[in-house]
Every structure is written in C-alpha cells, then in structure tokens.
Amino acid sequence: MNKNGAIVIVEDDTDDQEMFSEVFKELNYKNEIVFFNDGQEALTYLTGKTVEPFVVISDINMPKLNGMELRKQIHENENIRLKTIPYLFFTTSAEQEAVVDAYSKSIQGFFVKPSSFQGLKSTMKTIVEYWQKCESPNYVE
C-alpha cells in the first residue's frame, strides 16, 4: 500500500465531487485527490503500470462500469490486486443485498454517504487515518 499515493474517488455526481474536494481541502492531507466520473475511466487509470494509489473510494451506481463491476475487474487483475489498494464503497444506501455482494468481492469497507459536510469530513478523516496506520505487504513488481 502506497500511503503517499493518490486518493481515488470514483463518483459521477458533480455535487458530491465538490463536497469531497472541500472536505479534503480542509483535512489538508498531502495525498493528491483524483476524480473519475465512471468505473471505466478509473479502471484505465488503475491498470497503468506506474500508478499506485493510496485508496479507492467508489460509488456503486455509475454509468459505463458500475462500482461492483469495477471492483470485480480490479480483484481479478493480479497486477492491481498485488498493490494492496484498499477499495471502499461510498454510496447513498446500504441495502443488505448490495452490502453482501460488495463484501463477496473482497472490499474493505462499505459506507453510506453522510448528509452533512461535517459528517463527510468526519468519515473521511476516520477512513484515511485508519489506512495510514494499517500495515500491508510491500509490493515489488
């Protein structure tokens, strides 16, 4: 896991992207924040040989390649999987079937989007600080 890598946010809602931007500006982490509007764009980025982000935060319902499909393709790609990039779902609802499906694809977290700026900020702070403290195997290509 590259703790200095980018925080990748896969989210098609521009209002949510703006809120994420403001939250990370206030939290002032050194990680670059990279947005993708759909799973296909994110997959293209993640399959890049030199790319090793810190964490992927993904919506589920998106055009082209939804979050579940993206996660499945990432999990089946050994080059990406070996980078031990935490993959988290961040979506508007937590229906039991979606939660079970997500964890069956080896995600590392499933979060419901908070309705307030402070709620989002608190959740992002908890997520980032947790993964900054977490140990993982060193990935060497």
Image (tube, rainbow, N blue to C red):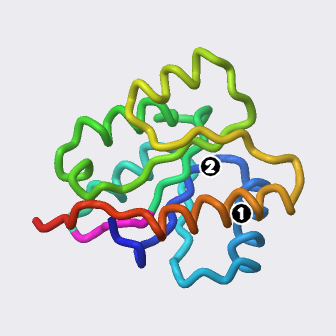
Residue, far left: 141
Q: Which secondary structure lies at badge 1?
A: helix
Quadrant of the image containing the N terminus: bottom left
Q: What stretch of residues is rendered in magenta?
A: 50-54
Going 35% across and 71% down the picture, which residue do you hit?
A: 2
* Residue assigned mark 2: 11
Magenta-highlighted stretch: main secondary structure?
loop
Going 46% across and 43% down the picture, which residue do you hit?
A: 108
Q: Earlier in the sequence, mark 1 or mark 2?
A: 2
Is residue 137 within the magenta segment? no
- Left or right: residue 118 versus residue 92 is right
Is residue 51 within the magenta segment? yes
Please tell me in which quadrant of the rendered image residue 63 appears.
top right
- Left or right: residue 12 versus residue 107 is right
Q: CA distance from mark 1 to mark 2?
A: 10 Å
Camera-nearest residue between 47 and 133:
133
Going 56% across and 57% down the picture, which residue do you hit?
A: 9
Q: Amino acid at mark 1?
A: Phe
* Residue assigned mark 1: 20
Residue 118 percent location from the top left of the image: 86, 62
Vertical order, 55 against 10 (above or below): below
Going 67% across and 66% down the picture, which residue do you hit?
A: 125
Q: Answer yes or no: do the residues labelled 1 and 2 have beta carbons within 8 Å?
A: yes
Q: Residues within 10 Å of mark 2 (few under 14, many from 20)?
A: many
